[in-house]
Amino acid sequence: MQNNVRRLREEHGLTQKELGERVGVSRQAINAIEKGKFDPSIWLAYDLARFFDVSIEALFLFLEEDRK
């Protein structure tokens, strides 16, 4: 799943570790999400969207070909 996590994180001047601490996950989890290797739970997606003050749809790009 494509996403805008890295762009928004960098715009906020945060490291992966700092963002992870703010939403309750590890740096590795943030890294995996940014690289598209891990799809977050709906609750983590919600927490990230709330942190960045954007909609989940603005943060994560839902493409039909990514549907599992």
Image (tube, rainbow, N blue to C red):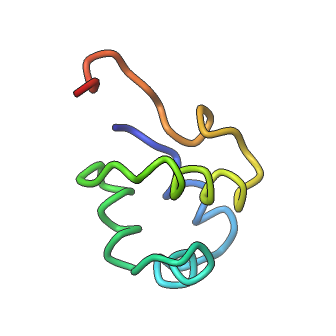
In the rendered structure, the answer to whether residue 62 lies left or right of residue 8 reads: left
Determine the residue positioned at 69% across, 68% down: 12
Q: Residue 34: where, in percent of width, then height?
A: 38, 56
Q: Residue furthest right?
A: 53
In the rendered structure, the answer to whether residue 17 lies left or right of residue 65 reads: right
Whether 64 is drawn above or below 38: the answer is above
Determine the residue positioned at 61% across, 51% down: 46
Q: Residue furthest top?
A: 64
Determine the residue positioned at 37% across, 21% down: 63
Whether 10 is drawn above or below 54: the answer is below
Quadrant, the N terminus: top left
Determine the residue positioned at 66% across, 62% down: 11
* Figure label count: 0
In the rendered structure, the answer to whether residue 6 lies left or right of residue 13 reads: left
Q: Residue 5: where, in percent of width, then height?
A: 51, 54
Whether 47 is drawn above or below 20: the answer is above
Quadrant, the C terminus: top left
Q: Residue 30: where, in percent of width, then height?
A: 41, 68
Whether 39 is drawn above or below 32: the answer is above
Q: Residue 49: where, in percent of width, then height?
A: 65, 51
Q: Quick one: 16 or 24, which is closer to the camera?
A: 24
